[in-house]
Image: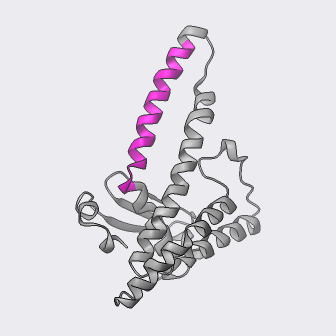
Amino acid sequence: VIAELPADQKQAFDWEVVVFDEDQVNAMVDPNGKITVFNGILRIADTQDALAAVIGHEITHATLGHTMDRMKRAARQDVWSMTGAAATGVQVREYLHIALALPFYREQEIESDVVGLRHMSKAGFDPRSAIYFWKGMIAYNESSGREAPPEFLSTHPPDQIRIDALIKNLSPALVNYNAAQESGKRPNCTISR
């Protein structure tokens, strides 16, 4: 997926994907393009295409500057919180976080899902696997008894909302995928465990 990024995005980051032997079902990226994948997520991203959806999502967080945006937003909120507390005597940090940060984070997650879909499909990975992945996340969360917090308290949107956004953006991704396949881009990755 990284190989198919525009040249400026490939060169602007020191891309690296590292898999950690941890049961955690998660992946993340730092502002420099270092992608961390915990092997617990491979229970759900169990095909090369589903893993490409995860990688495409994390690439998008980096290329769109989401990590830095979050750090800047948190710093501003801290200033507002201290100012508010000094003026009123009331600690407002959590209220600011819920009201200002969390909706912004959820928007970034959807944006990363959708743009990541484009990245993966241009690299020849089947974009329908992103939907497969999120259906797998729903099944995993249900089978493990995990209950999502109310949406307004979460950094991530509900899985079904993510699926809906992916479905709405699937047609252009399928066009990219078919064009990539026709041009000979047929990834053949293996996931070793």
Percent across and percent down for residue 160 are 69, 62
In this picture, residue 41 sits left or right of residue 31? right
Say how many tags the image has: 0
In this picture, residue 91 sits left or right of residue 160? left
Q: Which residue corresponds to the image point at 37% horizontal and 73% vertical from the top-left?
A: 1
Q: Please say whether residue 9 is one of the residues in the magenta stretch.
A: no
Question: Is residue 188 something one can see in this rendering?
Answer: no
Q: Which residue corresponds to the image point at 52% horizontal and 66% vertical from the top-left?
A: 22
Above or below residue 101? Residue 145 is below
Above or below residue 148? Residue 119 is below
Q: How is the image coloured?
A: one colour
Percent across and percent down for residue 101 are 55, 38
Above or below residue 24? Residue 152 is above
In this picture, residue 98 sits left or right of residue 58? right
Q: Which residues are magenta?
A: 62-85
Q: Which residue corresponds to the image point at 39% horizontal and 90% vertical from the top-left?
A: 182
